[in-house]
Image (tube, rainbow, N blue to C red):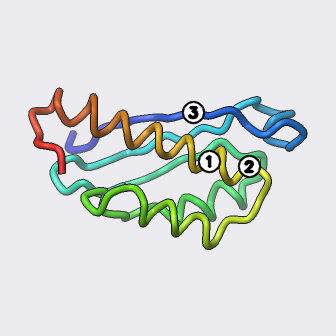
Amino acid sequence: MDTILVSGYAAAPKGSSMYEAYKTAGVVLEINPNTNTLVRAEFIFVTGLAKDYVSRLVNGYDLSQGIEPLVNRIQMHYFTPSAESVVMALRVAYQRYQQTALPRLGKAQK
């Protein structure tokens, strides 16, 4: 396979439906490390619409640009109580990609 999976999790905000259902915000990213492209992303959300919407926001993103442009994209389009938890989970997954996955694959960090 040409892709890898990384995940990240963060505490969901208390009182939100995400907290009541899952207690955490989570993301699983399928990444092509040869191109640094997010092939697919799956998020823990209560509704299918939220899962689909945020996945469409991030799919195809070039991680060699860093995480901040992607975070900004989410913050400009996703307005829910769990938004900051989702961003934190995404940051954790990105950090795992940079610090764990790329070195194991013998790829230089970009």
> Does residue 109 appear to the left or right of 46 in the view shown?
left
Q: Which quadrant, please, contains the N terminus?
A: top left
Q: Mark 2: which secondary structure?
A: loop
Q: How many numbered marks, from 0 up? A: 3
Where 89 sits versus 105, above or below?
A: below
Q: Which mark is residue 82?
A: 2
Where 92 sits versus 69, above or below?
A: above
Which residue was labeled with disc 1? 86
Residue 54 drawn at (x, y percent): 59, 60
Q: Farthest residue toward the bottom?
A: 76
**Label 2, label 3: how far apart the Cα atoms are:** 12 Å
Residue 19 drawn at (x, y percent): 81, 35
Q: Which mark is residue 95?
A: none
Figure quadrant of residue 23: top right
Is disc 1 surrounded by few (<14), some (14 to 19) or many (20+) residues within 10 Å?
A: many
Where 69 sits versus 23, above or below?
A: below
Is disc 2 surrounded by few (<14), some (14 to 19) or many (20+) residues within 10 Å?
A: many
Which residue was labeled with disc 3? 9
Residue 63 drawn at (x, y percent): 31, 56
The residue depicted at 72 percent of the width and 54 percent of the height is 48
**Label 3, label 1: how far apart the Cα atoms are:** 8 Å
